[in-house]
Image (cartoon, helix red, strand yellow):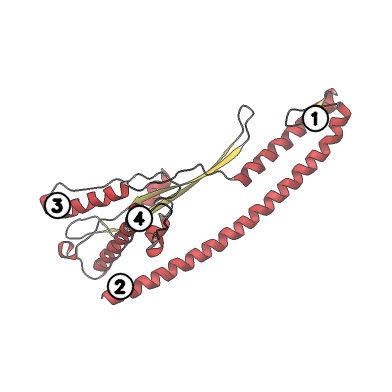
């Protein structure tokens, strides 16, 4: 809740002729959740990861009604451009197509659609709330908003469980190491048979001789997992840099488009 409150405080608002606290941009708050679940009832441990996107879409604006000028007018232009790009994505996702036909979805037309790519036709569950007004003067905006929401409702997402296999393997190896260490201690004290993590029994001497091999193998697998995590982190950093360059290029293109509109 503290993260959500901090995100709400970061929203940009200002006064216009229609609203004293009008949103001056679209706001997106993204929370990343990672959960490590230990194995229960003999099950294997696994790790889950997910993202929560909280999106506040600013309403479309008409300069004639808001009487916006200067900076406020430019903010309204950017708001409408983002809604237009989002509408194009929704239309592309809900358009009728032949089986097996490929349809280009323009996610890269704006930063908003690029950030919400997973929420629009991807691996997610999406809930959209449309805010409308009962005033007669806002009839056209209300009708357009309902049409917008109706098209968005037709998008079909395909949610799946996001499992981090590397973290799950590392957790499984840690459990095996702990189990072997505990059994080594009990076998050395009591002299009883040693059992492997899979439950197979072994004689006292044979089990003790196999335990160091299993420990070395677990250590080697943990080292391999650490190497893979480092490689994944480097790849993620490279992807982040490329994404930042793409956003910068889109921003430059947007500024050129605004200059042409002006």
Q: Residues within 10 Å of mark 1 (few under 14, many from 20)?
A: few
Q: CA distance from mark 3 to mark 4?
A: 25 Å
Q: Which residue is mark 3?
A: 139
To which residue does mark 2 refer? 258
Near-viewer residue (14 or 60): 60
- The front one of 65 and 107 is 107
User: Residue at label 4?
Assistant: 27
Identify residue for label 1: 185
Q: Earlier in the sequence, mark 3 or mark 4?
A: 4
Q: Nearer the viewer, residue 7 or 135?
A: 135
Residues tagged 2 and 1 counted as in contact (Cβ below 8 A):
no
- Which of discs 3 and 4 lies nearer the camera? The answer is 3
Q: Is residue 237 visible?
A: yes
Say above or below: 120 vs 212.
below
List the single residue furthest toward the left. 136
Residue 203, located in which quarter of the rendered image? Answer: top right
Disc 3 to disc 2, C-alpha distance: 29 Å
């Amino acid at each position: 809740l503290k993260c959500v409150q901090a995100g709400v405080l970061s929203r940009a608002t200002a006064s216009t002729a229609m609203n004293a606290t009008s949103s001056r941009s679209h706001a997106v708050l993204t929370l990343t959740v990672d959960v490590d679940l230990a194995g229960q009832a003999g099950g294997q441990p696994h790790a889950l990861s997910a993202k929560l996107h909280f999106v506040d879409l600013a309403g479309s604006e008409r300069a004639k009604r808001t009487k916006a000028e200067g900076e406020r007018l430019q903010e309204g232009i950017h708001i409408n451009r983002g809604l237009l790009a989002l509408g194009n994505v929704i239309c592309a996702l809900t358009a009728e197509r032949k089986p097996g036909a490929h349809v280009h979805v323009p996610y890269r037309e704006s930063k908003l659609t690029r950030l919400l790519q997973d929420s629009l036709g991807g691996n997610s569950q999406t809930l959209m709330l449309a805010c409308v007004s009962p005033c007669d003067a806002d009839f056209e905006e209300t009708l357009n908003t309902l049409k917008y929401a109706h098209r968005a409702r037709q998008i079909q997402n395909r949610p799946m469980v996001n499992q981090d296999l590397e973290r799950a393997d590392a957790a499984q190896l840690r459990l095996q190491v702990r189990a072997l260490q505990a059994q080594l201690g009990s076998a050395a004290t009591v002299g009883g048979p040693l059992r492997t993590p899979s439950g197979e029994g072994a004689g006292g001497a044979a089990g003790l001789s196999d335990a160091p091999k299993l420990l070395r193998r677990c250590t080697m697998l943990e080292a391999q997992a650490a190497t893979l995590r480092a490689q994944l982190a480097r790849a993620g950093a490279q992807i982040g840099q490329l994404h930042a360059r793409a956003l910068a290029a889109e921003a430059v293109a947007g500024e050129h488009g605004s200059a042409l509109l002006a």
